[in-house]
Image: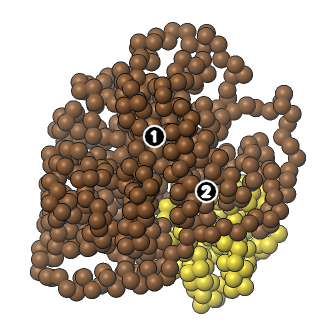
Chain colours: A brown, B yellow
């Protein structure tokens, strides 16, 4: 298609609405009165003090800079291992793994549904042998690793733990995060095997297992990122993410696990979008809301249980395929907002990500953007520099108020799982996403290079290409391994997983045994399909 | 027969869960007066072709963001031909490089919309190009 023609300018400045990217009306100026009734000690307090509005830690970035963690994964495990080492050599401080769609959906590389998708949107991992190659030369007690995987997370985490054991690293020395947030899958990201209730049961098994054996591991990263990418507003992102968190905490309590044994290991993952002030306010509101929820609703007494620590990623959906160099500016502004909001970890998107997985030069520019923010802008010198700003505090209050109103509605529906089964968060997001698109179509909102400031010619970019041999190589590898292992041991291990799945005992120990016996992602996921059934997209419109 | 509204199947093949675009297009076409059937996620080419037969549609719109478009469009075209549905208009959208757009159109795909296309343009195109079978 040719570029759309430039449309007439929107209404004159006096008539146009001034709204955030989430379509929230903003006052022309905020004054001291907007903070009437707000108490410094109760509502803001110093950084590191309840309710943590101003930051998770007293000295914030003087004490510890945020972790620079670029999400990476493509092709074969060998390809991604090279990218990991490239990033570590250039000053990255943690690893973050992107898996391909078959791995994420619980299929092996040789499954017919994997055809054309192997290694394309992430790295292909079917068995423990792939995991060994992926982390070749990287000691698992020397790095922390984040793994973005959900419905097959129990299997992938078991592989990571098995690999640590092979390296001689004790599980209580292994640190990192696995996303493992299935509720947001049913709300927004849409990767699943089985229906919501058995899916969250596996998550609680993992919370329990990690609390017992891998205390430095974060077993769930409660994620708003994908909710926002699906088109939600900032308020919906806050409400549905914290609503998911409430559901996990309640389920773990129902299992009989003491809240202060697991809550300090829950972590979060938020989006950071273009609307600078709204985003800074969002991170501040998130910390305050979670602190209140954990202390007042769940009665946690350990202050670490009250603390919302979060990773942030710049908004993929804000980037444009048109004039992709402009994305560097967007990412820099978003990164700055995340840091001013007090994030603990950050991924900055690469300028070419609307077109393909990022190329090496694009990834480097993205990582360097974080280093510029950290080393050159001076924003790390003082914690929460926007604290006390009339506008930021008013926005923080408002986001909190509106998000809690959503959480009340979800409680009335019987909690988040019931709300998801009724399609409530899904339809709210679809509505917001459609409204934003209509605002773009009418030029009420402008995206530079998309509906205004167009150019006729776009220079070509060098993009990352995934060679077709990747799929063939991975298919051959997994077939050969299936042939060369003990069939008896494999079926005994899969029976162990089946028994645990059916009788409600913790599913992690038998999965750990199964991956050590080279049982694959697909085979163990098939046990889930058999015992728990398969979930189908209800296709809410 | 000729009084019924034009029916469009919006389909999402592949394993990825990126349905924001598909849902927006489905809503926009519905608001534009078309009857829209949305398959939901994770459809195989066989499931899509079968749905096209069952629902007796006049057009199919595929949303593909996984990079697998050069496999999926031809697979669906072939199945449509096999089922005698060559008259069904096939269009699509997603992150699809220009060279691939040219190749897909040559193979028989009627139109491809890339990022930045407005829903107004897509609805206008559908009014112009989709007829009752």
Q: Residues within 10 Å of mark 1 (few under 14, many from 20)?
A: many
Question: Label 1 to label 2, Cα distance in Å?
Answer: 28 Å
| Label 2 SS | loop
A72 and A524: which one is in front? A72
Residue bearing mark 2: A351
Q: Is residue A56 visible?
A: no
Q: Please name the residue shown 37% across and 51% down the image.
A: A94
Q: Is residue A49 left or right of residue A453?
A: left
Percent coordinates x, y for residue A253 in the rendering: 22, 37
Percent coordinates x, y for residue A522 in the rendering: 30, 72
- Is A107 located above or below residue A244 in the figure? below
Q: Is residue A233 left or right of residue A435?
A: left
The mark lying in front, picked from 1 and 2, is: 2
User: Where the N terminus of chain B falls, by quadrant?
Assistant: bottom right
Q: Quadrant of residue A195?
A: bottom left
| Label 1 SS | helix
Q: Quadrant of residue A26?
A: top right
Image mark count: 2
Residue bearing mark 1: A240
Percent coordinates x, y for residue A37 in the rendering: 51, 9
Q: Is residue A133 visible?
A: yes
Q: Please name the residue shown 22% across and 33% down the image.
A: A259
A117 and A236: which one is in front? A117
Q: Please name the residue shown 37% across and 67% down the image.
A: A81
Which chain letter matches label 1? A
Task: Give the mark nearest the N terminus, 1 or 2.
Answer: 1
Q: Please name the residue shown 41% across and 12% down the image.
A: A41
């Amino acid at each position: 298609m040719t570029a759309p023609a430039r449309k007439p300018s929107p209404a004159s400045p006096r008539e146009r609405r001034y709204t955030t990217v989430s379509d929230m009306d903003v006052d022309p100026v905020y004054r001291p009165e907007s903070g009437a009734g707000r108490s410094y000690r109760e509502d803001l307090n110093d950084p590191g003090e309840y309710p943590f509005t101003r930051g998770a830690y007293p000295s914030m970035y003087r004490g510890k800079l945020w972790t620079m963690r670029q999400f990476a994964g493509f092709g074969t495990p060998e390809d991604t291992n090279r990218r990991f080492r490239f990033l570590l050599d250039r000053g990255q401080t943690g690893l973050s793994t992107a898996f391909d769609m078959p791995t994420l959906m619980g299929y092996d590389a040789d499954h017919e549904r994997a055809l054309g998708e192997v290694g394309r949107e992430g790295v292909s991992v079917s068995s423990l042998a792939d995991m060994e190659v992926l982390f070749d030369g990287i000691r698992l007690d020397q790095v922390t690793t984040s793994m973005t995987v959900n419905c097959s997370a129990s299997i992938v985490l078991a592989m990571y733990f098995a690999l640590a054991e092979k390296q001689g690293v004790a599980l209580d020395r292994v640190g990192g995060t696995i996303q493992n947030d299935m509720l947001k899958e049913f709300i927004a990201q849409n990767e699943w095997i089985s229906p919501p209730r058995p899916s969250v049961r596996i998550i609680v098994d993992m919370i329990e297992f990690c609390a017992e054996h891998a205390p430095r591991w974060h077993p769930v990263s409660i994620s708003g990122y994908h909710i926002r990418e699906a088109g939600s507003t900032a308020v919906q992102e806050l409400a549905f993410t914290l609503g998911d968190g409430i559901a996990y905490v309640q389920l773990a309590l129902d299992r009989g696990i003491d809240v202060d044994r697991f809550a300090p290991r829950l972590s979060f993952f938020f989006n950071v979008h273009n609307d600078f002030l709204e985003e800074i306010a969002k991170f501040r509101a998130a910390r305050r809301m979670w602190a209140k929820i954990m202390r007042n609703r769940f009665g946690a007494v350990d202050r670490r249980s009250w603390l919302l620590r979060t990773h942030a990623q710049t908004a993929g959906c804000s980037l444009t395929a048109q004039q992709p160099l402009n994305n560097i500016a967007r990412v820099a502004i978003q990164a700055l907002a995340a840091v001013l909001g007090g994030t603990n970890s950050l991924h900055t998107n690469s300028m070419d990500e609307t077109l393909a997985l990022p190329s090496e030069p694009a990834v480097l520019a993205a990582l360097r953007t974080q280093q510029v923010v950290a080393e050159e802008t001076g924003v790390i010198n003082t914690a929460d520099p926007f604290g006390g700003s009339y506008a930021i505090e008013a926005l923080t209050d408002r986001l909190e108020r509106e998000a809690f109103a959503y959480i009340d509605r979800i409680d009335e529906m019987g909690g988040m799982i019931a709300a998801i089964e009724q399609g409530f968060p899904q339809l709210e997001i679809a509505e917001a996403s459609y409204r934003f698109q209509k605002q773009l179509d009418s030029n009420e909102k402008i995206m530079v290079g998309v509906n205004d400031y167009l150019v006729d010619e776009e220079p070509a970019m060098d993009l990352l290409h995934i060679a077709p041999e990747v799929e063939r190589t991975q298919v051959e590898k997994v077939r050969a391994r299936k042939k060369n292992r003990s069939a008896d041991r494999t079926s005994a291990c899969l029976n162990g997983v089946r028994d645990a799945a059916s009788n409600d005992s913790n599913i992690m120990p038998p999965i750990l045994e199964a991956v050590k016996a080279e049982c694959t992602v697909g085979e163990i996921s098939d046990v889930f399909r058999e015992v728990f059934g398969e979930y189908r997209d209800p296709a809410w419109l | 027969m000729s009084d019924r509204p034009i029916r469009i199947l919006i389909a999402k093949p592949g394993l990825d869960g990126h349905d924001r675009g598909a849902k927006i297009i489905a809503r926009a076409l519905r608001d534009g007066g078309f009857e829209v059937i949305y398959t939901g996620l994770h459809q195989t080419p066989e499931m899509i072709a079968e749905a096209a037969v069952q629902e007796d549609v006049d057009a199919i719109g595929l949303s593909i963001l996984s990079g697998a478009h050069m496999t999926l469009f031809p697979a669906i075209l072939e199945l449509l031909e096999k089922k005698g549905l060559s008259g069904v208009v096939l269009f699509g959208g997603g992150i699809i490089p220009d060279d691939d757009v040219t190749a897909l159109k040559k193979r028989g795909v009627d139109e491809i919309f890339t990022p930045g296309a407005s829903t107004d343009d897509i609805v206008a195109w559908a009014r112009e190009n989709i007829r009752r079978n």
